[in-house]
Amino acid sequence: MTLHRSPDARSRLHRVLGTATLAAVGVVGAIPLALSGAGPASAAALPDWTVYHGSAAGSGVDSSGVSFASPSTAWTSAALDGSTFGEPLEDAGRVFVATENDSVYALAADSGTVLWRVNLATPVPANKLGCGDVSPTVGITGTPVIDSALGEIFVVADEWNGSTAVHVLFGLNIYTGNVEMSQVAEPPGQDGRGVLQRTGLNLVDGRVVFGFGGNSGDCQSPAGYHGWVETVPETGGSATYYEVDPLAGQSQGAVWMGGAAPEVDAAGNIWFAAGNGSQNGGTYDFSDAVTKITVSSTSAHPADFFAPTYWGSDNASDADLGSSAPALLPNGAVYQQGKSQIAYTLDGAALGGISTPPQTAKGAICSGDVDGGDAVVGGSSGADTVYEPCLGGIEAASVTPGQVAVPLAGWDRSTPTGPPIVTGSYLWSIDQNGTLYELNSNGTTSRTFGIGASEANHFPTPSVGDGLLLAPGTNTSGDAVIYAFAGSAGLPGPPAAGAAPNQPTGPVGAGYFEVSSDGGLFNFGGAPFNGSMGGQRLNAPIVGIASTETGAGYWEVAADGGVFNFGDATFHGSMGGQHLNAPIVGIAAAPGGGGGYWEVASDGGVFAFGGAPFYGSMGGKHLNAPVVGITAVASGGYLEVASDGGVFAFGGAPFYGSMGGKHLNAPVVGIASTSGGAGYREVASDGGIFSYGTALFAGSMGGQHLNAPVVGIAIDGSPPA
């Protein structure tokens, strides 16, 4: 296990768990969907939606009291950079969504405006996996989870390292997008090409919980798979694992649950369902099961499980329980139905092992697979209601402890098939035809909303946060987007302000960017994200970055001299397509509103564009090490930096010191001056930062996982302090 820890990780000794609770949901009257609390909650009290289906137990119930009887379209986001398989989340006035391009977005809940986007890695080309339902790339598939108290969102990204697939757990600051932690999350002995991290993520006792299954059905190509449940400390560190089909010669037993997250009850137990395993009889392999595990800092122990006595024949016919998550009911029962079309009523306190609990006849409630998470509503007479995403449409089961579940009286099977959620007296589900359905309390359709053509995601599910109903969909061009609908509370207010936890705060302009050779961008200390070349085709690798003075834009430059502008950065020309004696290695923006920039080559030669004046260069002079970067200073002039850390000043640029002649763990690759011109920072290829003059240290990628080496640095360009 490789650990990549941010410099401040040791100070984060305790993390408050904000979502790991199992709450009973009350009802009024005889209609199961009618939740207690008829009127909308105050704006300040509207709950967030920080985990799959809104709670650690996956209840799928909005408890805000906001009415969505007559929702209105609030906004549609800009096109996202990849498909979305996870559920949108909301916290602190921000809507979060992750894509199969390994990107995470934060959108303003009041407008849908992109507040930040971070491209974490290069996603895995689908054709490298041999099989699968996700294409053209596999990136972040499972629904993320947010620790509100910490101000951090966690995702698992599937990334391509040039030769194989690697799963990495990332923690990002919800206010800035800064990467707070990253850790390789591949289960021991498991080839990353063989597994898909499909489940949602959850939190328990300061640990992130998630599952792994196969890429598609029982496909074993190009590498076999086992089912896994993994937990990792939120600060990074030793992971724990539970493996399905763990013995030699065994395989499969996926933990995927149609995208639902492993559930966490009030006692901190983790619940999940496992798919069919490779064993059709003989020694039981812990597949085709509902399992409860307990987790410590060093291990994951099975506390209880249930498997039908005919688990072997279930495995042989792909009729297992693992396509949906267990429904943890307030009345103490656990309800489970998967592909066998048989519904089981289990005792949550004693699951029974391999046994025959109360169970329905085949097809009594669902006449097809159940795929994804349920919605659970507590009853007033001992019978709780489970709304489940059956292949033939949403069905409702009335479940009493110790008794065979029965169809809910008066329920009319509805059209949509996606995992449902409950808001007030209505049920919401997304069908694979790209339609969002609002269902009445008897299952009939109240209204529908077109949210684009169906994506490859077979199990999309909506969410509710800050008074908004959120649904993943596509626009008219087929690009993934998020649709937001407002209820009785109207639009939320602006995103809540918040500082990056565990990050030093400094004056405006104290933040900076690091850029990778694939064009991916990392922002620190409040520097805003405005896009990048990450995940896009490049003729030559990116080698540097420079920010505009406003801080609202920047340029990336490639080794062939090509320049790419983002935000308010203007294109003034480049060396792209022109003859070069040496490759371009950096770029710097001219100060004072001159509207230009300089490119610098590895031989020290400088090329000026726009209003940028020429002050001299190291071109044609002796160098102990090649030049690797350039930065402008506010007083006029610029600094060149060499790979050994040596700094060369031209024009009015002051010299404050350098890493020249000092030990380096990795070569220096860039330099950036502070906005006031009284300091600068050097950055190494491992992401390490070296500060001089008045330049503050606000964090770095040093010691953390990188999909590609760092190749440059730039401040956010805001007004001088």
Image (spheres, rainbow, N blue to C red):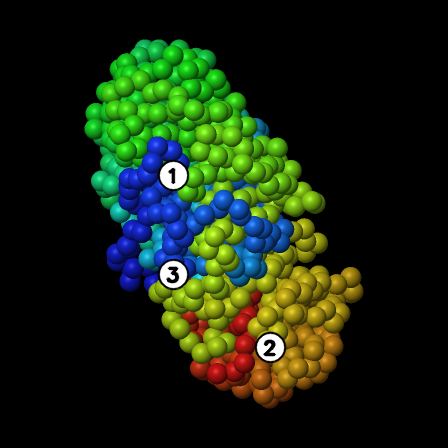
Indicate the amino acid at tag 1. Ala
Res 437 → quadrant: top right
Residue 34: mark: 1
Q: Secondary structure at mark 1?
A: loop
Q: Residues within 10 Å of mark 1 (few under 14, many from 20)?
A: some
Q: Residue 720 in the image: state x and y as whole percent.
A: 52, 82
Q: Which mark is residue 44?
A: 3
- Position of 374 compared to 545: left or right? left
Name the front one of labels 3 and 2. Answer: 3
Mark 3 vs 2: CB contact within 8 A:
no
- Counting other residues with Cα less than 10 Å from the Cα at mark 2, is it few (<14), some (14-19), or many (20 or more)? many
Q: State how far apart marks 2 and 1 are (Cα).
A: 55 Å
Seen at 43% across and 64% down, the residue is 496
Residue at image point 56% right, 50% down? 72
- Camera-near label (1 vs 3) is 1
Q: Quadrant of residue 541?
A: bottom right
Residue drawn at 69 percent across, 82 percent down: 594
- Front residue (pair 589, 627): 589
Question: Which x, y percent locates residue 350?
Answer: 21, 25
User: Mark 3 and mark 2: span between their CA atoms?
Assistant: 36 Å
Is tag 3's residue or tag 2's residue first in the polypeptide sequence? 3
Mark closer to the chain start, 2 or 1: 1
Residue topped by disc 2: 549
